[in-house]
Image: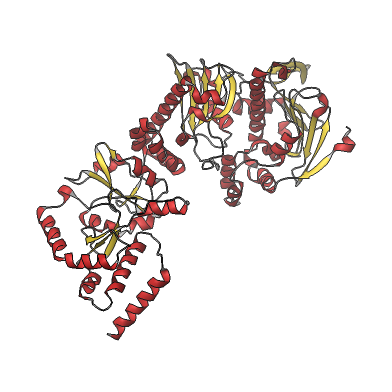
């Protein structure tokens, strides 16, 4: 097949066109990252070949010394990055270089504002990868062949960063990928061995494979390039070195490689574990959540190595899913080199590593929470809702996870989740033995709930829970440090020592005095309420709905219903405030008692965030009662 017969021109995916423009215009001030990204991709390609060759040695094609080569040509104005890794076939080239195969691309672009600094951060969060080449190049030519395929199965991809790229089949003797960058007019400094070496040492010194360039030396007063290769990076596994030998900048650079991130990590932990299981862990907490954090189809995990040999990306078995944001590596001395994902799921060794990594990350987060409140607030803003999943997932560490949780509360009445359970307990009123909370589908619904009225009157703090995951948190977390978590919207209200005997006697007397009224309302609302009783929760509102102690909360029922789940049939309890004018009016009402009772119920349902079964009937009833009141 000849180039003239198989060359094909294709259009980029829409998102790629947008990303290319941002590469060129938004990231120019950080242009050196292009080399870090391309070298990182080359390193990944070498790692993947080594892994595939574990099962099929012929993939090496008699060349098992993996390396990355850099070269530049001043006259042609080109910079070339080549590797002898796994390479790509035609379909892989189109998929990897013509489309962005990541979830959340539309949301990503909808958040871009045109502000250079913000755009750069978002691009980094998304991962710039191969397309960063267009920061410095006005044409990019990629020549590649997948290991194990015939030499006539090479693929040449070419683009000027516009809306199209061309692709053709070519002859390629060596496996792997070569990327030739045709530099823009203002990129002359990249045509210097000294400059390229300085960028490699700054961003890619930790790369495991040797990065080689032709040696340069001075001869007869001029610098000449020899035919001898020299390695310009350390070419050793950073995680295998002693912590005292690794600088903070080296840790950060390695994170950007392993996490494919643009920003520095928030925190990290590096440790060697010895004993029955021997492994090294270098785990990072990112500063920003990736766009596919909530995509359960996306693979989230850390890199697994065995005796410094790369085994797999995204080994999700090494950490529980509520820590899926963690990036880094685990290098085991005990696992077999031919380990597979299936083996990982059953392996006792992996379970021990998973437990060790989980405890290490939780310890790192506890350290942040205790000693760096600002960093922990940043972490919580990005990953707090994910951490909450752990309460129901990880029974062994439930108490530690609970200690890391943060909530909004009536203390500040703002949506900011800053209150820990330990903080809440420290502020408890004398005689208080419970942690009170309310769940709702929005912060304002929680903050303004009538269920809080007596708590506000007595100055008792209540946690305001409005995230979807919060219902599952309180469903799994029943107590913390021997203090029960109690919903203010479920069961009978028992404030214990926070109420004196006189208050309790007055409540019992009110309930007895209004037995006839509660019974009459219960009859009127038959089929809609389980019970009607006098409330002790309300000071300003006429009524509220309460779930029975063992029933599902109204908010939880609504969430499950919205998700298409079947929910058990249960009716709420209606509590009335006998001091409220509406209830006093109802007590004396004869002609329109059923209408007033129905309105009282519907108002209580709306106040807790529920939806009316018959909105038109509610409006009609309200209008009717208003006209009756005007006439009288």
Question: Residue at 30% across / 86% down in the picture?
Answer: 631
566 versus 168 height, above or below:
below
- How many marks can you see? 0
Between 449 and 67, the one lying in front of the other is 449
**Colour convention of the picture:** secondary structure
Q: Quadrant of residue 521?
A: bottom left
Location of the C terminus by quadrant is: bottom left
Between 483 and 603, the one lying in front of the other is 603
Location of residue 436 in the rendering, given as x and y in whole percent from the top left corner = 27, 48
Question: Residue at 41% across / 45% down in the picture?
Answer: 469
Location of residue 374 in the rendering, given as x and y in whole percent from the top left corner = 40, 40
Location of the N terminus by quadrant is: top right
Location of residue 603 in the rendering, given as x and y in whole percent from the top left corner = 33, 66
Outermost residue toward the bottom?
A: 631
Decide if residue 632 is on the left or right side of residue 356: left
Decide if residue 272 is on the left or right side of residue 261: left
Q: Is residue 136 visible?
A: no
Q: Is residue 460 visible?
A: yes
Question: Residue at 51% across / 18% down in the picture?
Answer: 332
Location of residue 440 in the rendering, given as x and y in whole percent from the top left corner = 37, 54
394 versus 24 height, above or below:
above
266 versus 525 height, above or below:
above
Decide if residue 575 is on the left or right side of residue 401: left
557 versus 286 height, above or below:
below
């Amino acid at each position: 097949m000849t180039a003239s017969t198989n060359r094909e021109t294709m259009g980029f995916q829409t998102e790629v066109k947008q990303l290319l423009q941002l590469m060129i215009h938004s990231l120019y001030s950080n242009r050196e990252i292009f080399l870090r990204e391309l070298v990182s991709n080359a390193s990944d390609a070498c790692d993947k070949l080594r892994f595939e060759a574990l099962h099929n040695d012929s993939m090496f094609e008699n060349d098992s010394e993996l390396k990355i080569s850099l070269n530049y040509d001043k006259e042609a104005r080109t910079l070339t990055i080549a590797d002898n890794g796994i390479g790509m076939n035609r379909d892989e080239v189109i998929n990897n270089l013509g489309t962005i195969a990541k979830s959340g691309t539309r949301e990503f672009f909808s958040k871009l504002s045109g502000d250079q600094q913000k755009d750069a951060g978002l691009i980094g969060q998304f991962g710039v990868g191969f397309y960063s080449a267009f920061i410095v190049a006005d044409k990019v030519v990629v020549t590649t062949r997948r290991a194990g395929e015939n030499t006539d199965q090479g693929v040449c991809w070419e683009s000027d960063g516009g809306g199209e790229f061309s692709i053709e089949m070519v002859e390629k003797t060596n496996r792997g990928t070569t990327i030739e960058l045709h530099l823009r007019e203002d990129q002359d400094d990249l045509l210097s061995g000294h400059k390229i070496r300085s960028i490699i040492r700054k961003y890619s010194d930790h790369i495991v494979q040797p990065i080689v360039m032709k040696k340069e030396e001075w001869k007869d007063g001029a610098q000449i390039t020899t035919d001898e290769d020299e390695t310009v990076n350390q070419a050793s596994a950073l995680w295998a070195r002693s912590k005292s030998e690794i600088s903070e900048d080296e840790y950060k650079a390695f994170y950007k490689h392993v996490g494919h991130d643009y920003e520095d990590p928030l925190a990290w932990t590096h440790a060697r574990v010895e004993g029955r299981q021997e492994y090294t862990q270098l785990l990072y907490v990112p500063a920003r959540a990736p766009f596919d954090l909530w995509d359960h189809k996306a693979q989230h995990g850390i890199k697994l190595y065995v005796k410094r040999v790369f085994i797999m990306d995204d080994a999700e078995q090494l950490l529980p899913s509520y820590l899926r944001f963690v990036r880094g590596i685990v290098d085991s001395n005990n696992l077999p080199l031919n380990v597979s994902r299936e083996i990982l799921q059953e392996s006792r060794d992996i379970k021990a590593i998973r437990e060790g990594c989980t405890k290490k990350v939780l310890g790192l987060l506890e350290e942040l929470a205790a000693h760096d409140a600002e960093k922990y607030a940043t972490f919580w803003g990005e990953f707090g809702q994910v951490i909450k999943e752990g309460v129901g997932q990880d029974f062994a560490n439930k108490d530690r996870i609970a200690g890391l949780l943060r909530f909004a509360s009536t203390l500040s009445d703002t949506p900011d989740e800053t209150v820990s359970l330990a903080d809440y307990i420290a502020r408890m009123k004398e005689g208080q033995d419970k942690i009170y909370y309310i769940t709702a589908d929005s912060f304002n619904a929680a903050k303004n709930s009538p269920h809080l009225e007596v708590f506000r009157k007595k100055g008792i703090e209540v946690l305001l829970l409005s995230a979807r995951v919060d219902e599952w948190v309180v469903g799994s977390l029943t107590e913390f440090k021997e203090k029960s978590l109690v919903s203010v919207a479920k069961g009978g209200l028992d404030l214990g020592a926070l109420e004196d005997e006189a208050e309790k006697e007055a409540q019992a007397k009110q309930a007895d005095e209004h037995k006839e009224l509660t019974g009459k309302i219960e009859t009127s609302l038959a089929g809609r309420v389980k019970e009607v009783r006098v409330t002790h929760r309300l000071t300003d509102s006429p009524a509220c709905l309460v779930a029975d102690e063992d029933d599902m909360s109204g908010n939880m029922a609504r969430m499950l219903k919205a998700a298409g789940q079947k929910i058990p049939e249960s009716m709420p309890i209606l509590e009335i405030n006998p001091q409220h004018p509406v209830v006093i009016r109802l007590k004396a009402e004869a002609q329109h008692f059923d209408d007033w009772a129905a309105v009282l119920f519907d108002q209580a349902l709306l106040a807790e965030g529920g939806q009316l079964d018959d909105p038109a009937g509610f409006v009609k009833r309200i209008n009717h009662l208003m006209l009756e009141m005007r006439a009288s």
